[in-house]
Amino acid sequence: MHKIKIQSVYLSLLLAYICILFPWSNFVLSFRPDFMLLVILFWLLRAPNLCSVGTAWFMGLWVDLAMGGIFGQYALAYTITAFFAVIYQRRLVLFSKTQQLVYVFSLLILAQIILLILKAFSGHQFIGWSYFIPSVSGVLLWQLAVSLGLNTGRHSHGQ
């Protein structure tokens, strides 16, 4: 097992932030996964000593600035989601790939539900079930990354 450098964490968070800042079109925007949350979840599960709930909160504030909505909503959503990710982090190595996908999907849905509740308090209308499409595309992106060899901390037992 090789040692993970803090620069790798910072670089991946910067790349996720740049992906958020891309000028996405309306159609693609409805499918865009939460890149920042996916990267935070990866590092929380892979290297919890380098990425913590505090990192999720800080990066959530940056996403709040980029999105231009209610300041603190992404910070709160990322912090709560990171907390639940850290709770089961040690057990994740025992999960199969399918269980990992369900776990990551539930974390992505949790973040979106928190954001939905916060937006409802500020007067936004629920746009329908299509609001949750980014969670589906996020878990598909996670599966693609795992299939291409991205190590999520799971031991390789030939699964």
Image: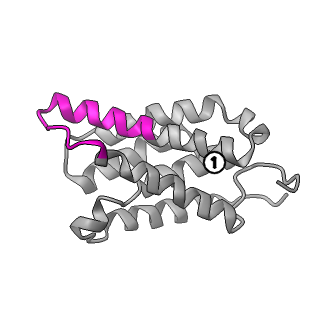
Is residue 154 left or right of 17 when viewed as pictured? right
| The image quarter in which residue 79 lies | top left
Whether residue 48 appears in this view of the structure is no
Give the residue furthest to the front. Answer: 129
Picture colour scheme: one colour
Which image quarter holds the C terminus?
bottom right
Magenta stretch in the rendered image: 109-129
- Residue 1: in magenta span: no
> What is the secondary structure assignment of the residue under circle 1?
loop
Q: Position of residue 9 (x, y in %)?
A: 58, 58
Q: Residue at x 47, y 54 (%)?
A: 138
Whether residue 121 appears in this view of the structure is yes
Is residue 37 left or right of 118 when viewed as pictured? right
Residue 5 vs residue 80, the one in the foreground: 80
Q: Residue at x 68, y 68 (%)?
A: 148
Is residue 76 left or right of 80 when viewed as pictured? left
Q: Position of residue 118 (x, y in %)?
A: 25, 32
Q: Position of residue 98 (x, y in %)?
A: 67, 46
Q: Which residue is mark 1?
A: 50
Q: Residue at x 60, y 64 (%)?
A: 144
> Which class describes the residues within 10 Å of circle 1: few (<14), some (14-19), or many (20+)?
some
Q: Position of residue 69 (x, y in %)?
A: 19, 46
Residue 8 vs residue 117, the one in the foreground: 117
Is residue 65 left or right of 52 when viewed as pictured? left
Q: Which residue type does callout 1 highlight?
A: Leu
- Residue 116: in magenta span: yes
Residue 47 vs residue 81, the one in the foreground: 81
Which image quarter holds the N terminus?
bottom right
